[in-house]
Amino acid sequence: MLTLYGTSFTSRLLLGTAQYPSPESLKLAVEASGAEIVTVSLRRESARARTGQGFWGLIEELGCRVLPNTAGCRTAKEAIATANMARELFGTNWIKLEVIANDDTLQPDLFGLVEAAAILSAEGFQVLPYTTEDLSAAERLVAVGCTVLMPWAAPIGSARGLINREALKTLRAYFPDIPLVIDAGIGTPSHAAEAMEMGYDAVLLNTAIAKAGDPVKMAAAFARAVEAGRLAFEAGLIEPRDMASPSTPVAGTPFFKIDHAS
Amino acid sequence: MKILLNGEAFATDAKTLDELCARLGFAEAKIATAVNGNFVAALKRSSTKLAPADEIEIVAPRQGG
């Protein structure tokens, strides 16, 4: 079971709700993924279009736990105000905290992130910070009250997979008891499986499913990859080695002569 | 009075944030608000007076990653 801030979930796949070809495909993809947590945002509401009102009806139909984000916020102040609006709007203390440093990489501003996380945690929010694999930032985030960390695999929407495996391994080893969710940069089910095999607790993704040729089928593929990766982690992976090691028993090999072995 | 509503110039004679929301048809809508960068809870909209050049944000649920 995946436990985040005291709530347990069967699925280890968290899904974004953006960029789907249609509301129907979003709904079917969420169902196919088995996700129990979906991310949402808040955006300016037009008095004429009233787009958000219809979207909220769709989200309620999904029956998933909602994780609002602060996507697009550039400062701690913006993120804090957005988190407060999200808390009132969605009726949850959960916040996927994003403070963005750079438009090209959409990388977290770790300084603003820690600043906002400290204030929001003190105000009773349960903060799920979108961070990097940086160990010192992770330590600060835990120190200010985060009990979940969400490091990126690669820049948002880049589909590049785990571009800094060694640092992600270190982060996993350094925080054995903190739920770690890979958030952003996953492109393929094998990327997700790899993260899970490394012992990451869950994967959060959006673009890889929403922009796939068949989002519903891709959602099913990711669900299986995440489950396979987790099972493999729990089963215990063998260590890689440099040289071959025969899997078929050597003893009793036909035509075996002793000089072969010398 | 001229204010900035969701980033655009907007003329209104609404006295409070609550009144502005109602005039925009948001009385029963699922929205959240901020004034000049600070969150204003739904319960405080009626006591939040508007002033010229105030920057108002009115947001609603949307797709997110």
Image (tube, coloured by chain):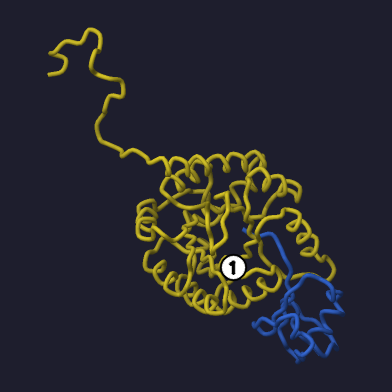
The residue that appears at 73% across and 81% down in the rendered structure is B56
Query: Where does the image place residue A240, in percent across and percent down from the top left?
Result: 30, 38
The residue that appears at 57% across and 43% down in the rendered structure is A222
Where residue B38 sits, quadrant-wise, is bottom right
Q: Which chain is blue in the rendering? A: B
Query: Where does the image place residue A192, in percent across and percent down from the top left?
Result: 50, 46
Give the residue type at disc 1: Ile
Query: Where does the image place residue A137, in percent across and percent down from the top left?
Result: 41, 69
Query: Where does the image place residue B5, in percent across and percent down from the top left?
Result: 76, 79
Q: Is residue A125 above or below residue A223?
A: below
Asked which secondary structure carries label 1, the reply is strand
Q: Is residue A30 above or below residue B13?
A: above
**Between residues A211 and A6, which one lies in front from this camera angle?**
A6
Which quadrant is the C terminus of chain A positioned in?
Answer: top left
Q: Is residue A91 above or below residue A243?
A: below
Per the image, the residue denoted by label 1 is A95
Q: Chain of mark 1?
A: A
**Between residues A197 and A167, which one lies in front from this camera angle?**
A197
Exactly how many numbered labels are in the figure?
Answer: 1
Left or right, A63 with respect to A16, comes to: right
**Between residues A87 and B32, which one lies in front from this camera angle?**
A87
Colour in which chain A is shown? yellow
Left or right, A58 with respect to A48, comes to: left
The residue that appears at 59% across and 71% down in the rendered structure is A73
Q: Residues within 10 Å of mark 1 (few under 14, many from 20)?
A: many
The residue that appears at 38% across and 60% down in the rendered structure is A175
